[in-house]
Image (cartoon, rainbow, N blue to C red):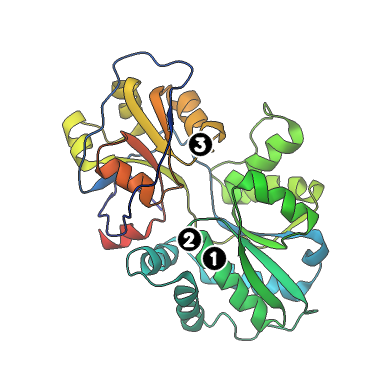
Amino acid sequence: MALAFATFGLAACGESGSSGTKAPDTASGAGCAPVAGTQLVVLDDDKKLQTSDNIIAVVNKAKGGDAALIAALDKVADALDTPKLIALNKAVDVDRKTPKVAATEFATAQKITDGLAKGAGGKIVIGAADFSENQTLGALYEIALDAAGFDASVQQIGNRELYEPSLEKGEINVVPEYAGTFTEFLNKKLNGASATPVASGDIEKTVTGLKPLAEKAGLVLGKASKAADQNAFAVTKAFADKNGVKTLSEFASKCSGTATVLGGPPECPQRPFCQPGLETTYNLKAGKFSSLDAGGPQTKTALTTGAITIGLVFSSDGALAAG
């Protein structure tokens, strides 16, 4: 989904939690101080830092041999595309429905449970990360798997560095993942931090590269959905208007330096498509990093109140449907 300079309102902002800031190793230039505002704009990723982050189910190999289980997960994948994912996120983040209610309504409308064959049954633990979209996806998986005869439940999990080993061990059985990001996570885990990137903007090529990595890790993949949720970077519209920036290249050219504050999840300084990616692809050096959440209310509030200059958001943000 193209999001070049997309504007969206912030109907779902909550109170900002406590967050730490730290200065990167190097930052030169004056940078750009934050500018508060009520609307955000997503800066165009004109150098294509982000890869194809389509939703894909990842399953522990002990459960992945059950054809009915994979078929149920694939039924969810077939029902989703990016506009539908945005609408689901709007239902939760803007309209304030619970992930389970939004998932149930969607599953009914899309007839996700119709015609599913019964599998071997037994308990299935679905891991859902600590942001609403992933929790809604987890609820969709639960509905489909229950209909296929399994006893499914959703367990909230931490970040990828914590939950991926649990998935390999079978402590959790299924996780809704993001193809490009997960590919590079496994690639670096298995082949070293300097491994040649495997993920790209082509979802078919990305999944082709992911399959052998997943196999080595003892994991099985479902079908990649047409729904994608990529990292995106936003500033306030007031900031964009003041500084004349529409793209990340323009932002980096004008705003690399000490006054710039980058906000994102705690793992952003280590993630290749977050701070390191901005540095290597755009030569953007921020003066400070503010540890917030993954595209959630803390980051949005920090942007609108002028606490950070630029922040990580998601391209499937439900507020996009309300703009």
Position of 119 with respect to 159 (left or right) is right
Report whether 58 appears left or right of 134: right
Tell me what residue is drawn at x 20 percent, y 48 percent: 38
Viewer-side residue, 282 vs 256:
256
How far apart are labels 1 and 2 at the CA level? 6 Å
Confirm whether residue 205 shows in the render.
Answer: no
Closer to the camera, 278 or 223? 278
How far apart marks 1 and 3 lie (CA) works out to: 23 Å
Q: Which residue is mark 3?
A: 268
- Mark 1 or mark 3: name the one nearer the start of the chain: 1
Q: Name the residue rendered at 77%, 72% in the picture.
A: 67
Residue under pointer 1: 137
Q: Which kind of residue does numbered mark 1 sit on? A: Leu
Q: Residue at horizontal 57%, vertical 41%? A: 200
Is residue 132 left or right of 56 when viewed as pictured? left
Q: Mark 3 belongs to which amino acid?
A: Cys
